[in-house]
């Protein structure tokens, strides 16, 4: 057997560089490159390997460990999970900075490979700088924190262990049913240790992502259920986009006249103006979709994991006999809500179900004008919100209207947290698939700018816009610098509403007078943060980093700034001043949050009683 002597880190990179995937007959390289921030624990191991033995892997210098993983997540999401970046860090805080992003990837079912440095396997220099020592279990290190947020976790304490660990890591990363964050903890001494690896370990390996077909019996069970139902509603989740099943989704809906609602991950599966597209579903849903959901006697969920926002905390489906048919590549998700599951690729499941349902001559009972009227009513509402004027300045919904009407339909918008996701889910009008990029599985603040950079890496031919609130911008904007360094332009649309206004709205809706969520100076009178708003020049901050920047406080200024930003060749930020509280809310949805049973405030106690009544009314499993 032919061998080659390499360090474990060199062998890892050579292995990653030889991995390919094949989807529908198209073959492509699986690992594009490695994001990294070096420190002790990886600089002399994997860092040296990247410097001299990277092969065709591209190295990108991150500025924050969490941020660089967010960029890798966004890249994989925009590439339909068919290509990834790995991410390497030092031990200790460098590694732990990636934990939040690992959870973001796992919750959203997005593949990302994490390679944190770890303690010396030999234990001879212990305790090293940044080492976490446990007096109860000395095998524990900081990287154990990744176990709960990873779909696969391993620690390589001998160089030859790489051969089994790497194979298992790629297995999980390329499996759409099990994918998420994969963590290989790399002790700093083992990274540099050499081993005679078999040449065969580095030969080109093609991983075939075969579309999982729908079981004949599962489809028959679903059809038997559907034949007894007259008012179906289809909910399109992210799996529709990952499966490239948008055409099949439209064909299925059109064949039977079934209205289609979308989750955050599934938005843009159908153009907003498609006759059967009824908009967003759930807590951040449209009035049209939520009303249809209330009256539906069956929900056909395709590629959705049924989060509480999708189901309005299970209160959105009030028909006494409502049942669920779930098409999902993951059996874990297809079994949810006690549903009749078709565990299959979304595209294959839709095709198979349509064929058998057509043979059964299935028909719905929707009046020919019912869906049309609901759509018209909702379109008028969106038009009104897009044109909304406010005496105090620019409303958030008006700003979104200007942006939606100004930027190119092929542009990708990226968002993640705050009040913007709700408004975008309800109001944004996408025409093309994959132009709406929302991380709302984990709703991770700080994802937006890093995610936009990842999307720009994945789709350099498109304009990419990061939509971010001032609160999220302050949490993490570091990969803005990386976008400048790499020459990948994005436009940051920063909505300045003076704080964490989304949560400010939530707390006030549950009896609070508002506490701790606005960016105000501390009052000398009250001792609380109730003074004037902080004055922050975000445009100046962006310019100081090397970006171009503009400001807008009116619709006219915003349109002009967008046009100027379009002409810029480098990352550009537009600071948009909007009136706090001018976002959307409600539309016959509900969200279950804990409200205190006991409080000195009558408003809080009343909110608790209302919450308790709503909880008792929920009958869905």
Image (cartoon, helix red, strand yellow):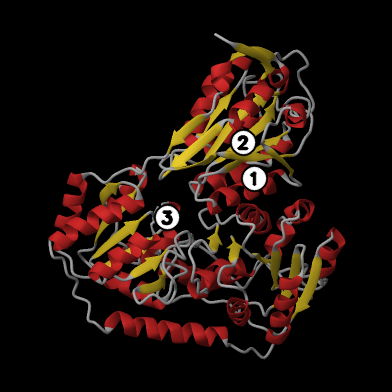
State left or right for residue 424 relative to residue 341.
right
Q: Is residue 562 above or below residue 89?
A: below
Marks 2 and 1, how far apart at CA:
8 Å
Q: Position of residue 57 (x, y in %)?
A: 67, 36
Q: Callout 3: few (<14), some (14-19), or many (20+) C-alpha neighbours within 10 Å? A: some
Q: Are marks 2 and 1 in contact (CB under 8 Å)?
A: yes
Residue furthest right as drawn: 544
- Residue at mark 3 to residue at mark 2: CA–CA distance: 27 Å
Which residue appears at 64% of the width and 32% of the height?
Answer: 115
Q: Are the residues flagged by discs 3 and 2 in contact, CB closer than 8 Å?
A: no
Of residues 14 and 92, the one drawn nearer to the viewer in this rendering: 14
Residue receiving disc 1:
69
Q: Position of residue 440 (x, y in %)?
A: 53, 58
Left or right of 412? Residue 370 is left
Q: Secondary structure at mark 2?
A: strand
Depth order, front residue of 585/81:
81
Q: Which residue is mark 3?
A: 244
Secondary structure found at label 3: loop
Q: Sequence-wise, which precedes: disc 3 or disc 2? A: 2
- Give the left or right position of residue 182, taking residue 238 as reference: right
Q: Earlier in the sequence, mark 3 or mark 1?
A: 1
- Between 293 and 277, the residue placed more toward the observer is 277
Using a 10 Å C-alpha cutoff, classify the residue at mark 1 as few (fewer than 14 neighbours), some (14 to 19) or many (20 or more): many
Q: Quadrant of residue 542?
A: bottom right
* Residue 419 appearing in the image: no
For residue 114, the mark is 2
- In space, the residues marked 3 and 1 are separated at their CA atoms by 24 Å
């Amino acid at each position: 057997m032919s061998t080659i002597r390499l360090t474990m880190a060199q062998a890892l990179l050579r292995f990653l560089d030889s991995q390919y995937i094949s989807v529908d007959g198209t073959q492509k390289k699986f690992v594009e490159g490695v994001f990294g921030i070096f420190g002790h624990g990886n600089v002399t191991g994997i860092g040296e390997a990247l410097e001299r033995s990277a092969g065709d892997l591209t190295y990108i210098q991150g500025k924050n460990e969490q941020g660089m993983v967010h960029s890798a997540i966004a890249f994989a999401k925009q590439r339909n999970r068919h290509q990834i970046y790995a991410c390497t860090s030092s031990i200790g805080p460098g590694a732990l900075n990636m934990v939040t992003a690992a959870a973001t990837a796992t919750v959203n079912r997005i593949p990302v490979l994490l390679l944190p440095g770890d303690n010396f396997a030999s234990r001879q220099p212990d305790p090293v700088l940044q080492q976490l020592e446990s007096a109860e279990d000395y095998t524990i290190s900081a990287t154990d924190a990744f176990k709960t947020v990873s779909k696969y976790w391993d620690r390589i304490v001998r160089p030859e262990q790489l051969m089994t660990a790497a194979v298992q890591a790629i297995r999980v990363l390329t499996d759409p049913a099990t994918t998420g964050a994969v963590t290989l903890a790399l002790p700093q001494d083992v990274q540099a240790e050499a081993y005679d690896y078999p040449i065969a370990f580095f030969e080109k390996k093609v991983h075939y992502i075969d579309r999982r077909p729908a079981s004949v019996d599962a489809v028959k069970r679903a059809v038997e259920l559907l034949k007894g139902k007259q008012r179906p509603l289809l909910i399109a989740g992210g799996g529709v986009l990952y499966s490239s099943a948008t055409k099949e989704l439209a064909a299925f809906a059109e064949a039977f006249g079934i209205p289609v609602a979308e989750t955050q991950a599934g938005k843009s599966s159908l153009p907003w103006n498609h006759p059967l597209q009824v908009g967003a579903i759930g807590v951040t849903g449209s009035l049209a979709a939520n009303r249809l959901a209330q009256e539906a006697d069956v929900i056909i969920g395709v590629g959705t994991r049924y989060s509480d926002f999708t189901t309005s905390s299970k209160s959105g489906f009030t028909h006494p006999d409502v049942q669920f048919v779930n098409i999902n590549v993951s059996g874990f998700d297809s079994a949810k809500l006690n549903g009749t599951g078709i565990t299959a690729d979304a595209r294959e499941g839709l095709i198979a179900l349509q064929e058998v349902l057509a043979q059964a001559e299935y028909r719905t009972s929707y009046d020919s004008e019912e869906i049309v009227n609901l759509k018209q009513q909702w379109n008028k509402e969106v038009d009104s919100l897009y044109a909304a004027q406010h005496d105090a300045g620019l409303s958030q919904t008006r700003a979104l209207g200007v942006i939606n009407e100004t930027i190119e339909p092929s542009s990708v918008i990226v968002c993640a947290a705050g009040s913007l996701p709700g408004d975008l889910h309800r109001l944004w009008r996408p025409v093309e698939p994959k132009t709406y990029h929302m991380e709302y599985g984990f709703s991770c603040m700080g994802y937006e700018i890093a995610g936009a950079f990842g999307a720009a890496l994945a789709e350099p031919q498109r304009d990419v816009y990061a939509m971010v609130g001032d609160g999220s911008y302050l949490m993490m904007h570091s990969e803005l610098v990386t976008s400048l360094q790499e020459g990948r332009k994005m436009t940051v649309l920063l909505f300045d509403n003076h704080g964490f206004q989304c949560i400010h709205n939530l707390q006030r809706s549950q009896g609070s007078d508002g506490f701790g969520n606005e960016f105000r100076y501390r009052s000398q009178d009250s001792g609380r943060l109730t003074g004037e708003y902080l004055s922050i020049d975000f445009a100046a901050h962006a310019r100081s980093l090397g970006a171009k920047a503009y400001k807008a406080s009116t619709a006219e200024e915003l349109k002009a700034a967008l046009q100027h930003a379009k002409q810029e060749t480098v990352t550009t930020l537009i600071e948009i001043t909007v009136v706090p509280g001018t976002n959307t809310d409600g539309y016959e949805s509900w969200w279950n949050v804990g409200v205190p049973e006991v409080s000195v405030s009558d408003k809080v106690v009343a909110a608790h009683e209302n919450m308790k009544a709503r909880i008792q009314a929920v009958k869905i499993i």
